[in-house]
Image: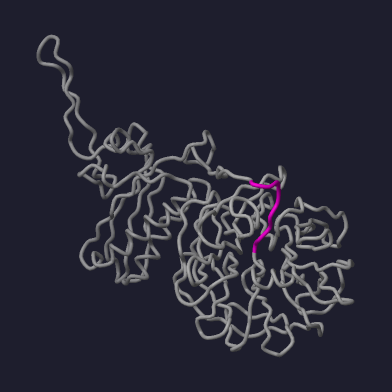
């Protein structure tokens, strides 16, 4: 039962390992770059400048929250390079009317070059050195009818005039408090990121397991670690969360009733939704199908933990796998809905396999070296995140990403604790994962090239994160 023990310790969310021994390197993230229209013209990231916005009157006290949020939202998206604020010109525009084209005067003497007279902020102040940026986001806030109004613009400063430079010009409204300031900043950032071919993570949720209340319960938080809330209160061990594609349901395994059971709760009301469980010593690793109508999970059949599938209420139960080995952690391809990954000990050590949803066309994807756990598909079904006990630190789990077509994995973490449970963000650019660094296990996010690591939790031990689109 070594496989079972490892999976219980590691958790059930997002670990798959693949490939040859001692693989190193970095994955080059596929980021939309080049033209603001989303056309990919080169592999370098466009540079954007975002000077601090100012507020008029009663809006000013909320500007720190707004500016910090706007900067973080854009910079953490991983699709642009942020121009350093230390290089910004002193004369910062607040609205398009502030731009004044320079005047070129004719020479007054023979051999004298024409002179350029600066009349105010201009596009070349930002496109030229030392800033050398491609895009400028600017604006200001005011109070309108008791609401906070953000007037935001995005300019392509490589253009020759103000009219052709404007990419975004929009007003955003929020409440007159810190929450409203953060909301309008997120809305502005979402529009900016959309121009670069990516989606904002605002509105998405991360569900995870935490023991901070004294028992392992299911919790939720916003994508950036804020708004952490306890969802279950069974005062028992509840773990292995899975979220339905529409974000309305969360399924998990709990021991609150004695024997392990899968229970389903509404993410909006918190109430339990009926699910008929098989009576077994093992019922775990739930996973919704992409249409949200069925659940795959692992349970004991004929003395072995096998893969099974049932309707979302537990009816229509049927067995998928039929082998004298432990098989757990089914993960359905979100793009096709017809193939799945799972962990199996049928060839010896726990390895990752791929098959159709009915168990046909079986393929082992891993080499047999090391231990593999908890596969996690990227939203486009082209990549897999996983943990592996090989690599730079044999015997310790680290996070890898593998391109499904080439089956070439790249190690993302090394030398920073025990890293497990990776799960893809809805944008396909970020990952969330758990890591034990010191005495506690916490949840972190990072870009899918291993950069921009951010700690999201601090209280108690937190693990097994899954990233949801949020309730649709």
- The quadrant of the picture occupied by the N terminus is bottom right
Q: Please tell me which residue lies in front, 465 or 214.
A: 214
Residue 243, can we see it? no
Please name the residue shown 54% across and 54% down the image. 413
Please name the residue shown 54% across and 68% down the image. 205
Q: Position of residue 207 (x, y in %)?
A: 57, 71
Q: Please tell me which residue lies in front, 413 or 230.
A: 413
Please name the residue shown 67% across and 68% down the image. 12
Q: Position of residue 449 (x, y in %)?
A: 54, 48
Residue 160 lies in the magenta stretch: no
Residues in magenta, as a range? 14-22
The mark tally for this picture is 0
Q: Position of residue 463 (x, y in %)?
A: 57, 71
| Residue 292 sits in quarter | bottom right
Residue 253, can we see it? yes
User: Is 294 on the left-hand or right-hand side of 77?
Assistant: right
Specify the farthest residue to the top.
Answer: 110
Magenta-colored segment: predominant secondary structure: loop
Q: Please tell me which residue lies in front, 136 or 369.
A: 369
163 above or below 10?
A: above
User: Is 2 on the left-hand or right-hand side of 88?
Assistant: right
11 above or below 409?
A: below
């Amino acid at each position: 039962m070594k496989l079972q023990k490892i999976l219980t310790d590691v958790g059930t969310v997002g670990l798959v390992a693949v490939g040859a021994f001692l693989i190193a390197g970095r994955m080059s993230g596929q980021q939309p770059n080049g033209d603001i229209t989303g056309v990919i013209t080169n592999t370098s990231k466009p540079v954007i400048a975002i000077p601090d916005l100012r507020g008029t009157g009663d809006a000013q006290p909320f500007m720190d929250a707004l500016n910090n949020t706007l900067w973080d939202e854009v910079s953490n998206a991983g699709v642009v390079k942020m121009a350093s604020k230390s290089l910004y010109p002193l004369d910062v525009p607040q609205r398009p009317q502030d731009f004044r084209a320079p005047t070129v005067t004719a020479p007054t003497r023979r051999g004298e070059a024409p002179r350029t007279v600066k009349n105010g902020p201009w596009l070349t102040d930002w496109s030229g050195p030392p800033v050398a940026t491609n895009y400028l986001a600017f604006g200001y806030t005011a109070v309108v009818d008791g609401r906070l109004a953000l007037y935001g613009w995005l300019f392509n400063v490589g253009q020759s005039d103000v009219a052709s430079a404007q990419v975004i010009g929009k007003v955003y409204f929020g409440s007159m408090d810190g929450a409203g300031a953060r909301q309008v900043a997120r809305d502005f950032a979402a529009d900016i990121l959309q121009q670069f071919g990516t989606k904002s993570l605002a509105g998405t949720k991360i569900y995870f397991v935490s023991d901070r209340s004294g028992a392992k319960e299911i919790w939720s938080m916003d994508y950036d670690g804020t708004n952490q809330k306890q969802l279950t209160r069974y005062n028992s061990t509840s773990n292995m969360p899975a979220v339905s594609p529409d974000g309305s349901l969360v399924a998990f395994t709990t021991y609150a009733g004695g024997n392990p059971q899968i229970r389903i709760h509404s993410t909006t009301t918190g109430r339990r939704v009926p699910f008929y469980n098989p009576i077994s010593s093992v019922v775990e690793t739930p996973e919704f199908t992409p249409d949200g109508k069925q659940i795959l999970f692992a349970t004991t059949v004929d003395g072995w933990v096998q893969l099974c599938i049932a309707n979302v209420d537990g009816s229509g139960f049927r067995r998928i796998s039929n082998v004298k080995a432990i098989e757990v952690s089914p993960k359905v391809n979100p793009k096709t809905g017809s193939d799945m990954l799972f962990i199996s000990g049928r060839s010896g050590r726990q390895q990752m396999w791929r098959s159709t949803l009915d168990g046909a066309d079986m393929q082992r994807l891993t080499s047999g070296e090391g231990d593999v756990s908890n596969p996690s598909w990227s939203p486009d079904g082209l990549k897999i995140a996983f943990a592996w006990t090989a690599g730079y630190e044999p015997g310790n789990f680290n996070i890898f990403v593998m391109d499904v077509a080439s089956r070439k994995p790249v190690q993302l973490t090394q030398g920073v604790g025990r890293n497990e449970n990776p799960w893809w963000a809805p944008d396909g650019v970020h990952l969330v994962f758990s890591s034990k660094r010191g005495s506690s296990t916490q949840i972190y996010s990072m870009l899918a090239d291993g950069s921009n690591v951010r700690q999201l939790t601090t209280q108690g031990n937190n693990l097994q994160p899954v990233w949801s689109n949020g309730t649709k």
